[in-house]
């Protein structure tokens, strides 16, 4: 995969696209029970994932994977960030408006499919787990 358009074509085939703009594609990531843990709580859960094209230094294309997992007002940020420090492998938390968002970025230049799928799954699973723990629902 070398370009944003290549990534979009791949995502259209592989994932459930719910919205697409010029530099952004949103997918509904669906979990099965064995996706990231052994219990049945994850079965049927979903996570809205936003893949956005970012251009660094006006020359390098990157893809940013982002997903909200809570409203800032609904969580204790210190406790949430401490939990992320203990359990999250990829991504970092940022505040975007009223939302707490888990995001991770990857360069597109030499990106292989597995280098998108694995971080996408890890970000979605981490956000879904944080959502379960701190919100108790499946809102995103």
Image (cartoon, rainbow, N blue to C red):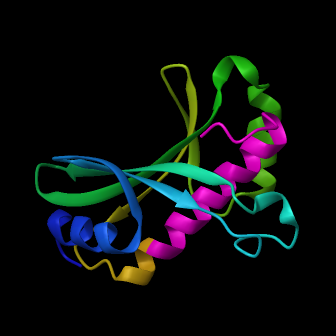
Q: Is residue 17 left or right of residue 53?
A: right
Frontmost residue, 140 versus 53: 140
Residue positioned 76% across, 60% down in the render: 42
Residue 112 point in image, percent of width and height: 34, 83
Frontmost residue, 39 versus 129: 39
Residue 94 point in image, percent of width and height: 54, 35
123 in magenta: yes
Frontmost residue, 49 versus 17: 17
The answer to which quarter of the image holds residue 17 is bottom left
The answer to which quarter of the image holds residue 80 is top right
Q: Is residue 99 above or below residue 8?
A: above
Residue positioned 24% across, 79% down in the render: 1
Residue range of the region highlighted in magenta in the rendering: 117-140
Q: Residue furthest right?
A: 39
Residue positioned 26% across, 69% down in the render: 7
Q: Is residue 55 left or right of residue 71?
A: left
Frontmost residue, 91 versus 17: 17
Residue 33 point in image, percent of width and height: 77, 70
């Amino acid at each position: 995969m070398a370009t944003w358009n290549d990534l979009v074509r791949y995502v259209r085939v592989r994932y459930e696209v719910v919205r697409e703009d010029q530099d952004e594609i949103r997918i509904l990531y669906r979990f099965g029970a064995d996706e990231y843990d052994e219990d049945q709580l994850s079965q049927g859960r979903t996570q809205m994932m936003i893949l956005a094209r970012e251009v660094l230094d006006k020359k390098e294309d990157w893809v940013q994977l982002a997903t909200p997992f809570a409203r800032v007002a609904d969580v204790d940020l210190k406790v949430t960030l401490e939990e992320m420090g203990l359990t999250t492998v990829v991504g970092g938390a940022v505040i975007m408006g009223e939302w707490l968002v888990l995001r991770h970025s990857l360069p597109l230049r030499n990106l292989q499919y597995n280098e998108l799928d694995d971080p996408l799954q890890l970000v979605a699973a981490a956000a879904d787990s944080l959502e379960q723990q701190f919100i108790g629902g499946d809102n995103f």
